[in-house]
Amino acid sequence: MKVSKSVHVEESPRDHFLGTAPKAGTGNWRAMRRQWGLWAELTRNLAVRDVETRYKHSMLGLYWAIVNPLVTAAIFGFVFGVIFHVSSKIPYVVFMLTGITFWNFFVNGVMSAVGSISGNAALLAKIYFPRIVLPTASVLARFIDFFFSLLVLIVFIFIYHTPIYWTSLWIPVILVLQVFFTLGIGYLVAALNVLYRDVNQLMGLILLVWMYFSPVMYPVTNLKPSLRSILLMNPMGSLLQMERDVIFTGHLQYPLFAWVALAWTAFVFLAGISLFRRIEPLFAEVM
């Protein structure tokens, strides 16, 4: 039986959600705002679900966000502060805890994003939504851990009477850069992990090495200029240095590397989105 080409196709819920169905006024801003509002709400709900799942049936629950940085700071503080006698201009415990607080947000965000697609195969099969929402929600969910760790850092700053400067108000701006850099890496590893499931193990190893090549546990001011430049070319190295500088020195000690961090962030974020979109059509076939 021959079907006429003039058959009217009704708008499906999927098309309506995506905003891709042909309809009058497709380009109007109201429709676009509604679509972005739906995606933002979905991202928020998934982030909340991620946090609830992470601490479900846990004895300490969200208190792990406080215990983990404290134990890590105690171990590294003993190794680098007592055994190797690493010194800094501020109390070493505060110096160490600052690095760990911002570094852990990056690591936890990336590692959460790795399995965000492959670990939600059942959800992807039930309903259509932009797949990039999943790694985005996984990264943003780590803000809960970061918030509690930041409270611990503030307490230690007061305990050790460490002076801070008004330039600390720049922290949200630098943190935004770190979030976009983390999202870029998160998109890359989330997409690749669908094709190669050993990405999770590989990223654990890469992040361990990356930490030692970033000024998490040691100040770069004590290093030779050539080695310092190499370490600050590392985007996370320059971001960590900027975050410490605005809190404890009142100015950027190495302003040139702020532009390096900005360039790296833009490149990684755009590259992450680009690769994710290229691999996204393969998700259904692989999973």
Image (cartoon, rainbow, N blue to C red):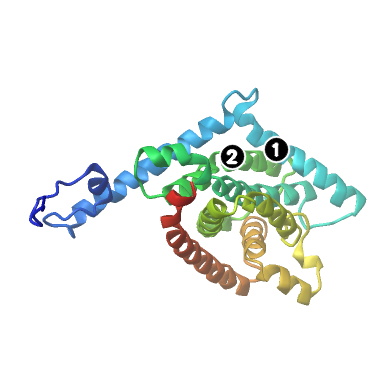
Rendering coords of residue 144 (x, y %): 54, 39
Q: Read off the residue under disc 1.
A: 68
**Name of the residue lying farthest toward the front:** 1
Q: Nearer the viewer, residue 218 or 22?
A: 22
**Name of the residue lying farthest toward the right:** 83
Question: Amino acid type of disc 2?
Answer: Asp
Is label 2 in a helix, a strand or a loop?
A: helix
CA gap, disc 2 to disc 1? Answer: 10 Å
Q: Nearer the viewer, residue 276 or 253?
A: 276
Residue ID at (77%, 46%): 93
Query: Toward which corner of the image does residue 75 lie, by quadrant?
Result: top right
Q: Nearer the viewer, residue 42 or 175?
A: 42
Question: Amino acid type of disc 1?
Answer: Asn
Q: Are marks 2 and 1 in contact (CB under 8 Å)?
A: yes
**Name of the residue lying farthest toward the bottom:** 226
- Above or below, 61 against 10 in this view is above
Is label 1 in a helix, a strand or a loop?
A: helix
Residue ID at (21%, 44%): 12
In-image side of 39 versus 257 (left or right): left
The circle drawn on residue 145 is 2
Rendering coords of residue 90 (x, y %): 76, 54
Visible in this render: residue 23?
yes
Rendering coords of residue 189 (x, y %): 56, 55
Residue ID at (46%, 59%): 279
Along the polypeptide, which appears first: circle 2 or circle 1?
1
Graded by Cα atoms within 10 Å as few (under 14), some (14 to 19) or many (20 or more), the crowding at tag 1 reads: some
In-image side of 191 versus 100 (left or right): left
Rendering coords of residue 184 (x, y %): 52, 59
Graded by Cα atoms within 10 Å as few (under 14), some (14 to 19) or many (20 or more), the crowding at tag 2 reads: many
The circle drawn on residue 143 is none
